[in-house]
Amino acid sequence: MHNLEESIAQWRRTIMAAPTFSHETLDELENHLRENVDQLVRSGMTESEAFQRAITQLGGVRGIASEFQKLDQPTWLPVKVITGIGVTTALALAILLIVRFDTGRLSFLLASHVFMVTLGYTTTFLIGALGICFVVQRCLSDFSPFRVRSFTRVTFILGGAAACLTAVGIILAMVWAKNEWGRYWAWDPKETGAFAVITWQLCFLLAHRFACHTARGILVMSVLGNIVVGFGWFGPNLLSDGLHAYGTRNYLLLLLAAVVFNFAVFVIGLAPAGWLRSRKTL
Amino acid sequence: MKLEKELVAASSVPLVLSILSEGDSYGYAIIQRVKELSGGKTEWTDGMLYPVLHWLEDQHLVRGRWVKSESGRKRKYYSVQPDGRQALRQRKAQWTLVTSTLNQLWRPQHA
């Protein structure tokens, strides 16, 4: 006696071996199979014959899998480049801090704080860099909804990593400050900057979770991130007071130029997608 | 008659969009409609429809939603979106041009 449920379960196991299929797709294909078996049984076939016919009509797993694979677009080049930069930065920073820790110039707590916060801030800059690439390419042609969704997913993962790294870095710094300076937090310019950065990073994640799934929404968040982290990270170094005063550095103009650049990118991003290509073809 | 693979691929999008423009539908019913319209002469491999549907969904030309049928079985119904209607208009114009050109060439000659 043919057992349809067992045959379908066996077919599902076979098809699940191909990583191309999501559970939803599998449910959809199974539903199709069941509808077809029902129809064939109604037309007079035995359940076993109907199942075999339905499987044949559905087509081979490899054929369907290869058609689904065509839907997967390769990873966008800037995402690959930025991932490479992120990994290289993390490795270089780890080596530098290990050397400093090894020679006794940095305590473990401070080295861990510097590692976490630097990576957290850098990751936010990398999201901003992706946003800039996004705007540049959008000037030439619009992104497919698939690409926008992929971009949204990547920036959400990076944003989550940035917020976690910064948060852990700040907590480590608070513990270190309590040991060294006798207090956890004092709204020092650098600490205020860190507070602004973590606040923005959390807002970024909230905006991602509840809205901003459009190309423009992502662009606004990315550009704002560059400006907030720029001021939060490098702004306090321009001030001569505060416990984190490492000596005034004269790069105010550079910082302002970076802000202007990011605003320019933001304004360009507000133009309709593909506007540059339309001008070229005039 | 077995259609060439390339022709099946090229016609799949306008065919699916046209069927969905008649009303919301799901995979199995779409296949049945294609068979009915072609008098059973168009041989589609059923499984090949789903990558097309998912591609249309990715492009926001159609929208899919799971609905529980009267039999209790869940089906994914697809409906055409405004961009899909626009795409269908474009495809229709292209296919009309192709068929009218071929019809003129293949019209019986009366000498």
Image (cartoon, coloured by chain):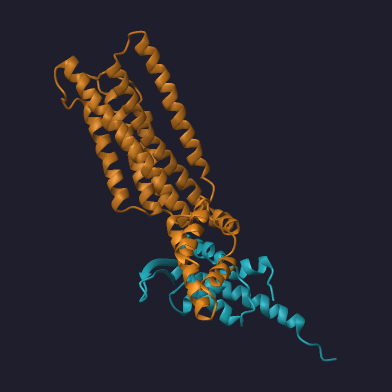
Chain colours: A orange, B cyan
- Residue beneath the point at 47% across and 27% down: A88
Q: Looking at the figure, which quarter contains the N terminus of chain B?
A: bottom right
- Residue beneath the point at 36% across and 53% down: A213
Q: Nearer the viewer, residue A69 or B70?
A: B70
Image position of A233 (left or right of B83): left
> Would you say residue B61 is visible in this rendering?
no
Q: Nearer the viewer, residue A40 or A124?
A: A40
Spot occupied by residue A107 in the image (x, y as percentages of width and height): 29, 14
Spot occupied by residue A13 in the image (x, y as percentages of width and height): 49, 54
Image position of A241 (left or right of A12): left
Q: Nearer the viewer, residue B55 or B43?
A: B43
Residue at the extreme bottom: B110
Q: Looking at the figure, which quarter contains the C terminus of chain B?
A: bottom right
Spot occupied by residue B32 in the image (x, y as percentages of width and height): 53, 77
- Residue beneath the point at 46% across and 63% down: B57
Total residue callouts: 0
Image position of A19 (left or right of A106): right
In the image, residue A98 sits, relative to residue A209, either above or below, namely above
Spot occupied by residue A243 in the image (x, y as percentages of width and height): 21, 18
In the image, residue A30 sits, relative to residue B40, either above or below, namely above
> Would you say residue A230 is visible in this rendering?
yes
